[in-house]
Image (cartoon, rainbow, N blue to C red):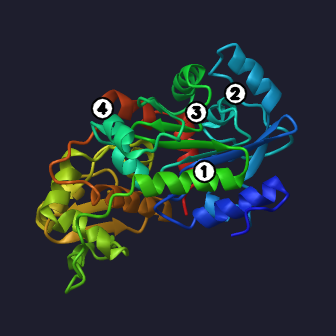
Amino acid sequence: MNLLNSNIGDNIRKYCANIGENPLLVQGAGGNVSWKENNILWVKASGTCLENAEKDDIFIPVDLTHLTSEINNKNYSVTPKVIGDIHLKPSIETLLHALMPHRIVFHLHAVEILAHLIKHNYIDILKHSLSNNLSYAVVDYYKPGEQLASAIGTILENNPTADIVFLQNHGVVIGGDNITNIDKLLNQLTELLVSHPIFQSPKLINTPEAPQDLSNQYSPIVDFELHQLALNPVLSKRLKNEWVLYPDHIVFLGPSPFIFHTWIEAQEKIIYSKSLPELIFIIDQGVFVSTKFTKAQLAQLRCYFDVLIRQSPTTTLNTLNKKQIAELLNWDAEQYRQSLSIL
């Protein structure tokens, strides 16, 4: 990829389209990117996908002078002012981008990094794995938006030179003056924090099938490796006990999984449901989805799988608590983002 294009916008769009096709870096509409130019913050619109950066107008202009003034007054609840008549909304995490002093900011949910940020001892892992020449800061989990922006603001006051901010149970923020800097830091992080899959998915001998009377409602998930979530006992245990690990997972896949041990059990419970679950797990049989299951949801389930297969069976993971889950489920901004991500 040519990273030396003189046009910063075209350069960033090209890079975003490239990494947006890598599910280990970007999942569906997850992640957001920005750059600062002439007192304008160009930021990814909520619910749009980085992989479409070159073919769609996914970046929208926000008044940076206004944002900076409000941030200086510690007003982290400020609504960004979009410049022009644009129907899309700026990213939920626009303030995060304005807070970072760098010209270009990437916020990603990269699997190799996220796989560590959900562990109890993630800070020790970062200290042990990262080289001394990397300037980074760490932020505990906060609800995206105002709460997270406030926490990052405090962290950056104490660590003004940080180019990297790790967000517990969430992702990573990387700042740089050009795409070459961003690319170098992202490659360094994914290489230093790489953790190879522990569980290898055996080939399925037979395609899982739903019972005849449910075959019109449910079909086996198209990504066959994901059936291991119901077939592998270690993964199935995590599925039950460690479902909610980061915000995008709950927003797109819900607060708890629908797990059944037999199709009979599933039928008995589904028949009384107000609406059919879009995703169900039948232990020792496979993973099944309804016709309403979207590409965006598939991307998030794949991310969850990719994170889990990098965990030792004895590793303890942090899960979001009931209060944190409720905050995300009842949040208008996330409901808006999800509504745009029906892919």
Q: How many marks?
A: 4
Give the side of residue 212 with respect to residue 14, left or right.
left
Q: Earlier in the sequence, mark 1 or mark 2?
A: 1
Q: Nearer the viewer, mark 3 or mark 4?
A: 3
Q: Which residue is mark 3?
A: 162
Mark sitting earlier along the chain (3/4): 3
Identify which amino acid the numbered label 3 is placed on: Ala
Q: CA distance from mark 1 to mark 4?
A: 25 Å
Query: How would you rate the neighbour count of disc 3 (Cα within 10 Å): few for under 14, some for 14-19, many for 20 or more?
Result: many
Which residue lies under the disc numbered 4? 321
Q: Nearer the viewer, mark 1 or mark 3?
A: 3
Query: In the picture shown, does residue 30 fall above or below 96?
Result: below
Marks 2,4: beta carbons within 8 A: no
Using the image, tell me which numbered label, if any, was put on residue 159. Answer: none
Residue at image mark 1: 47
Label 4: few (<14), some (14–19) or many (≥20) C-alpha neighbours in 10 Å: few
